[in-house]
Image (cartoon, grey):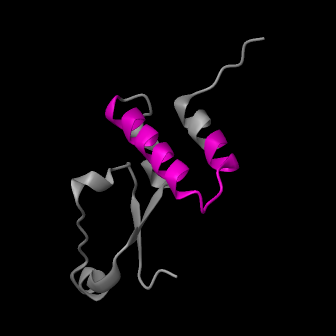
């Protein structure tokens, strides 16, 4: 049997089975997603469907007032049109 799929489809399928609290696997999946974007295995024309959510912590008020957010390159990148910031992670 042959099943056609895409890298995007593989990532979505993995997301469906990974527990939200399994941070190690979430990081592995994020690394794979970054690899797919960097090597153009996933076209970013659907970035309008994505929101990146980042912990802002002590800089939250500055980020909101200045309408500005920046992060270290080590945190990776994924194409997105929306950014969600949060603080006081529980």
The secondary structure making up most of the magenta span is helix
List the single residue furthest toward the top.
1
| 14 or 44, nearer to the observer | 14
Residue 9 visible, this orientation: yes
Q: Is residue 74 above or below residue 86?
A: above
Residue 14 lies in the magenta-colored region: yes
Tell me: 2 left or right of 25.
right
Q: Is residue 76 above or below residue 35?
A: below
Query: Which quarter of the image is occupied by the N terminus?
Result: top right
Q: Is residue 44 above or below residue 16?
A: above
Instruction: Please name the residue shown 58% across and 57% down the image.
Output: 22
Residue 17 lies in the magenta-colored region: yes
Q: Position of residue 49 (x, y in %)?
A: 51, 53
Instruction: Please name the residue shown 63% across and 25% down the image.
Output: 5
Residue 64 visible, this orientation: no
> Which quarter of the figure has residue 56?
bottom left
Tell me: 76 left or right of 46.
left
Q: Position of residue 72 (x, y in %)?
A: 22, 59
| 24 or 83, nearer to the observer | 24
> Which quarter of the figure has residue 85?
bottom left
The region drawn magenta spans 13-39
Instruction: Please name the residue shown 46% across and 53% down the image.
Output: 48
| 68 or 46, nearer to the observer | 68
Instruction: Please name the residue shown 44% across and 85% down the image.
Output: 88
Q: Position of residue 80 (x, y in %)?
A: 40, 54
Q: Is residue 13 above or below residue 21?
A: above
The number of numbered badges drawn on the structure is: 0
Q: Position of residue 16 (x, y in %)?
A: 68, 48
List the single residue furthest toward the right.
1
């Amino acid at each position: 049997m042959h099943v056609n799929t895409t890298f995007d489809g593989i990532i979505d399928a993995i997301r469906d089975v990974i527990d939200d609290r399994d941070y190690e696997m979430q990081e592995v999946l994020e690394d794979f997603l970054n690899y797919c974007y960097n090597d153009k295995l996933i076209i970013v024309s659907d970035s309008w469907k994505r929101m990146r959510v980042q912990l802002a912590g002590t800089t939250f008020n500055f980020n909101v007032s200045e309408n500005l957010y920046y992060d270290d390159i080590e945190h990776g990148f994924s194409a997105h049109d929306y950014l969600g910031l949060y603080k006081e992670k529980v």
